[in-house]
Image (cartoon, rainbow, N blue to C red):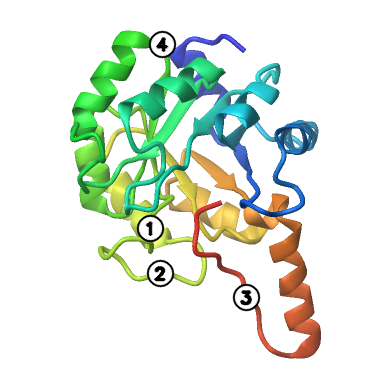
């Protein structure tokens, strides 16, 4: 789906982005399956989808909504589209928006975030979403040229504690100091969470696990039935 930057951002305004990902080794870990889930989300009203991996992005490239693409690779702290070459591959696969680690941590290829964004744009006409974990990350990512600021890594870096639900305080803080659109992402488990994130200042809301990860959703119900509480969080963003 070819769109210019302005139309992509306008399409996402005030809407729901659905993250369609499965973890390695899971039954649904297949590009065609992820593409089918993405199509189902669009039928339900999603204004965009977030897909991980080159094969998954290619499998859903015919969608008529913006694709936020990323490539998780490596076991270092920075593993969400960690290098320029990863970012370029995501763009080449058909993503309209390349999501990458937007923290201030060193990147594996030695490039700064600003260098990564600039060199990516020299090669591809795409938007960049910076997955951040703090206000300082967001400020730095905006200065580096990111088009969107995500709260994806809130609670997954030492900068902030992990909240039970979405980090609404972080969304409010970023909105008060940054001009770029904010995509609220991370631990948004209910429609009420999504609405609260929007009220806090999010331009768009991204939900993954609570919509597209049946293994985790099942554990919530099992835990509730057994009276053992809920296991509503995973180590990774989704």
Labels 3 and 2 touching (C-beta < 8 A): no
Estimate the spatial distance between the alpha carbons at disc 1 and disc 2, rounded to whole Å.
7 Å
Labels 2 and 4 touching (C-beta < 8 A): no
Q: Residue at x 24, y 19 (%)?
A: 118
Estimate the spatial distance between the alpha carbons at disc 1 and disc 3, rounded to whole Å.
18 Å
Could you tell me residue 167's position as x and y percent?
Answer: 42, 61
State whether residue 76 is above or below residue 32. below
Asked whether 44 or 26 is in front, the reply is: 26
Classify mark 1: helix, strand or loop.
loop
Labels 1 and 2 touching (C-beta < 8 A): yes
Mark 1 or mark 2, earlier in chain = 1
- Residue at label 3? 231
**Residue 125: mark:** 4
Q: Residue at x 58, y 53 (%)?
A: 195
- Residue at label 1? 154
Asked whether 51 or 32 is in front, the reply is: 32
Mark 3 or mark 4, earlier in chain = 4
Mark 3 or mark 2, earlier in chain = 2
> Dot 2: few (<14), some (14–19), or many (≥20) neighbours within 10 Å?
some
How many tags in the picture? 4
Mark 2 or mark 4, earlier in chain = 4
Asked whether 120 or 76 is in front, the reply is: 76
């Amino acid at each position: 789906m070819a769109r210019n930057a302005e139309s992509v951002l306008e399409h996402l305004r005030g809407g729901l982005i659905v993250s369609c990902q499965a973890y390695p080794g899971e039954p649904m870990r297949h590009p065609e399956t992820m593409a089918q889930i993405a199509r189902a989300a669009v039928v339900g009203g999603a204004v965009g989808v977030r897909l991980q991996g080159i094969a998954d992005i290619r499998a859903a490239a015919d969608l008529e909504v913006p694709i936020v693409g990323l490539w998780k690779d490596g076991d270092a702290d920075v593993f969400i589209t960690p290098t320029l070459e990863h970012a370029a591959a995501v763009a080449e696969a058909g993503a309209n928006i390349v999501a990458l680690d937007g923290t201030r941590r060193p990147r594996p290829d030695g490039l700064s975030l600003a260098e990564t964004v600039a060199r990516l744009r020299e090669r591809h006409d795409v938007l960049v979403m910076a997955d951040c974990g703090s206000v300082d990350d967001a400020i730095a990512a905006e200065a580096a040229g990111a088009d969107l600021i995500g709260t994806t890594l809130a609670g997954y870096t030492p900068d902030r504690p992990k909240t039970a639900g979405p980090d609404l305080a972080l969304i409010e803080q970023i909105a008060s100091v940054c001009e770029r659109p904010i995509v609220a992402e991370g631990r948004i488990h209910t429609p009420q969470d999504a609405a609260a994130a929007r009220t806090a200042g999010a331009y768009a809301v991204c939900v993954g696990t609570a919509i597209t990860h049946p293994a985790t959703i099942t554990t919530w119900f099992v835990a509730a039935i057994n009276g053992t509480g809920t296991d509503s969080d995973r180590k990774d963003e989704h």
